[in-house]
Image (tube, grey):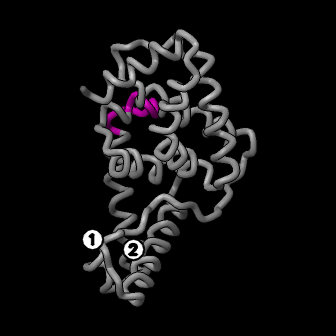
Amino acid sequence: MTSNYKDIQLIAKVKLGDTSAFRALVEKYKDVSFTLACSILKNEKNAEDALQDSFVKVYKNIHAFKSNALFSTWLYKIVVNTSLNLLKKEKRFIHDSIDIVKSNNLGIADTDANLVNNNRTEIIKTVLDDMTPNESLLLRLYYLSELDINEIKKITGFGVSKIKTTLFRARKNLHTALKTKLGNEIKHLI
C-alpha cells in the first residue's frame, strides 16, 4: 500500500468522525510540518502555535481535501501559509535555535566523535537559521522532506524558475557559510 492510499483511508475515517484516524495523520506529519514552520518563523514556540493552528484548519476543512492530490502537499501548504501569516502579523524575524537536523546515530561510542557530530549539527542549524526564510524553507522541503519541484510549487505557490533559482542560491550560500564556519572540516560533513 502506498502512503497516499493509507492517507486517503485515514481521511475517509476522519470525515466520518474518527478522531483516532486524525491523530494518526497528525503523528505521521507533525515532525516535517514543525520543521517547515520553524524554517519560516525561526522560533519553536511560534512554530508550535502555527502547527496547532494548521492542524485545526486541516481538521475543520478535511471535507475540502481532494483525494486526487497528495495529503502531504495539501497539509504542508496550510502549514506554510499559516506560518507566513503569523510572521506577517508579527512583522519581525526571531532567530532562536531550532532542532531540524537530527544527529547521526551511527553507533559511534567515542564521546569525542559524538561531541564533534553535535557541534556540526549545531553549526548546520545556525547556518540554516541565518539564511533567508525562502532559502531555508526550500532547502528543507527539497532535501529534508525530499519533495520534488512540482510539490514544492504547490506548497509555496512559487514559480518553478523561482524555486530552482532560490535552491541554487541557497545551496551555494549554505556551502559558503559552512565552509566559513567549518573550514577543512566541511569535507567530512558532506
Where does the magenta region start and end?
A: 153-161
Within 10 Å of disc 2 (Cα), the crowding (few <14, some 14-19, many 20+) is many
The residue lying toward the viewer, choosing from 4 and 161, is: 4
Residue 79 lies within the magenta run: no
Within 10 Å of disc 1 (Cα), the crowding (few <14, some 14-19, many 20+) is few
Quadrant of image for the N terminus: top left
- Measuring 34% from the left and 59% from the top, which residue is drawn there? 171
Nearest to N terminus: mark 1 or mark 2: 2
Q: Position of residue 28 (x, y in %)?
A: 45, 38
- Residue under label 1, please give it: 190
Q: Disc 1 marks which amino acid? A: Ile
Contact flag, marks 1 and 2 (Cβ < 8 Å): yes
- Residue under label 2, please give it: 178
The residue lying toward the viewer, choosing from 117 and 124, is: 117
- Measuring 32% from the left and 34% from the top, which residue is drawn there? 160
User: Is 157 left or right of 4, judged from the image as shown?
Assistant: right
Q: Where is residue 75 in the image (x, y as percent from the top left)?
A: 49, 29
Q: Disc 2 marks which amino acid? A: Leu
Q: Element under label 1?
A: loop
Asked if 173 appears above or below 83 in the picture, the reply is: below
- Measuring 33% from the left and 14% from the top, which residue is drawn there? 68
Q: Element under label 2?
A: helix
